Amino acid sequence: GVNTDQCVFGTLQDAQFLGYDSFLVEDLCATTSPNFATEMVEFETGSIPGSPGLTAVVNSSSLVAAIASRSPSASAARL
C-alpha cells in the first residue's frame, strides 16, 4: 500500500469499524511521511507490545505461506 499512515491506515480503520477482520502487511506498505507517522500506525495496529491492536500485522512471507496451506492443492497433497 501507499502512504501507510494515510490511505492504508484509513482503510484498516474503516474495515475494523465495519466488522471486517483485517491485517496490515507491513513489508508491502511504505510512506514518505516522517518516521513518527509510521510509528503511530505501528502502535495503533498492534505492532508494538502494549498497543491497542486494531488489526493483525503480518509480513508477506507469512501471508503467502498461510494462503498456500489453505489452497485445495495443498489439502489434496496432505491426503
Image: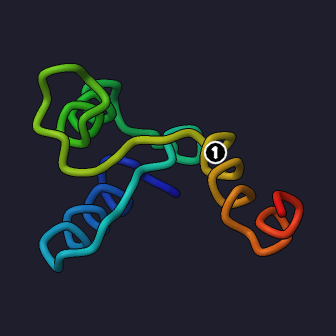
Q: Residue at x 25, y 63 (%)?
A: 10
Q: Up-down: is 17 above or below 1?
A: below
Instruction: Name the one closer to the observer, 36 or 43.
Output: 43
Residue reaching furthest bottom?
18
Q: Residue at x 42, y 50 (%)?
A: 24
In the rendered view, does 20 fall on the left or right side of 60?
A: left
Q: Residue at x 84, y 63 (%)?
A: 79
- Total of numbered circles in the picture? 1
Q: Name the amino acid type tagged 1.
A: Ser
- Circle 1 crowding by C-alpha within 10 Å: few under 14, some 14–19, many from 20: few
Instruction: Name the one closer to the observer, 70 or 20.
Output: 70
Q: Residue at x 63, y 52 (%)?
A: 66
Q: Up-down: is 49 above or below 30?
A: above
Secondary structure of the residue carrying numbered label 1: helix
**Residue 6 image-quadrant placement:** bottom left
Residue reaching furthest top?
49
- Residue annotated with mark 1: 60
In the rendered view, does 62 fall on the left or right side of 38?
A: right
**Where's residue 23, x and y in %?**
39, 54
**Residue 75 image-quadrant placement:** bottom right
**Where's residue 17, x and y in %?**
12, 72
Q: How is the image coloured?
A: rainbow
**Where's residue 14, x and y in %?**
21, 72
Q: Up-down: is 7 above or below 25?
A: below
Instruction: Name the one closer to the observer, 20 or 10.
Output: 20
